Image: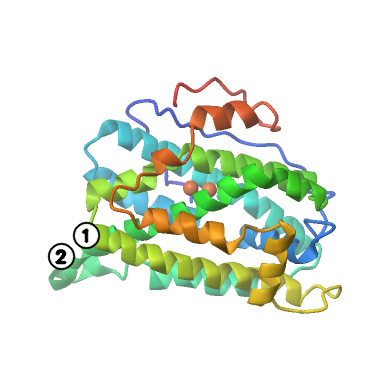
Amino acid sequence: MTTILKTATQPSAILPRKIKLDWSQTPLHALKQAPEAGHYINAMHLLVHIEFWFCKLFNKALPEIQDQTLVADMKAFMRQEATHARTHIGAREHLAAGGTEIDSFLKDYEWFFDVVLGDHNLQQYPWLKPLERWWLNQRLSITSGLEHMTLFLAKWVLENHDMLSKAGVDQAVLDLLIWHSMEEIEHRNVAFDVYNQMSGNLASRRFWGVLTLVFMFYWWPRGASHFMHQDPSMVKRRSRITTYLHCARQGTLPNLQSLGAFFLNYMKSDYHPRDEAVTAEILDRWVHILPLASEWTPSKVS
Ligand SMILES: [Fe+2]
Ligand SMILES: [Fe+2]
């Protein structure tokens, strides 16, 4: 992932930031009083390969985008997503150093995105060339759907951070979740706008929107189970729907009703993620509290 970024032609209102986090004191149980939900949070460190996958797709789409403001936003989006992924990998490496086996999960998960949802070398075969653009558009639709799910989680984290604190969340994990959530909200329009400029087909948005919900509820519990399976303190060694529902009732994971309502919004023909939040309010609320590595300058976005 060393060459994913190209020079921006004009500045974006979206600001990539780095955060200083010390993992040395972070335990396996990210939530002291809610270990099952803590494993769901740890599973987020396993799922960040999609952020590199988004970057690869955006680099393919960049030459097709005429709107230079959107081009600048895409480049800022890629910087943010690549930094998110690398920072979560830091947490993941800390857990691996403590004896948690991670590679077998990543092998399957990365295969799914890189091979099943990969390029399939369509450019090698002239008769398949017309499919290349179609397949790129489908994957940009998947990106938009996954960003919608990420936005849901980001809003949930920022609205429920006090529940995580009550459950004894590790400070570095909390800072990571808040920083990541803040930037997900900041760049929430980008994947949706890219898809709209490249295709905008509503049926495809809805089709892949449903499937991204399936992806999320396949890979996220599987990641949590991967941790639970290795945790001798767990009574149940894998996550079931009842495990998730128990955590949601505790308030340490989002409830399914709010997820369902959020998801249905995405199905509406006039949906746009800009209406989901006021970016300046979110940035003003959190950016001064977080241990950011570089100075932040006030954003002019609304
Ligand atoms: Fe991200
Ligand atoms: Fe994102």
Which residue is denoted by mark 1 in the rendering? Answer: 133
Query: Is 296 left or right of 265, judged from the image as shown?
Result: right
- Residue 109: in sight, yes or no? yes
Residue at coordinates 70% horizontally, 41% vertically from top-left?
175
269 shown above or below 104: above
Residue 35 lies left or right of residue 196; in this view the side is right
Which residue is located at x 61 percent, y 62 percent? 46
Quadrant in the rendering for residue 137: bottom left
Can see residue 48?
no
Q: Determine which of the numbered discs, if any, sits on residue 130 in the image.
A: 2
Residue farthest left in this picture? 127
Q: CA distance from mark 1 to mark 2?
A: 6 Å
Spot occupied by residue 14 in the image (x, y as percentages of width and height): 46, 32
Contact, mark 1 vs mark 2 (Cβ under 8 Å)? yes
Callout 1: SS:
helix
Give residue 37's position: percent from left, percent from top.
72, 62
Tag 1: residue type? Arg
Residue 29, percent from left and from top: 80, 60
Label 2 sits on what residue type?
Pro
Above or below, 110 against 294 in this view is below
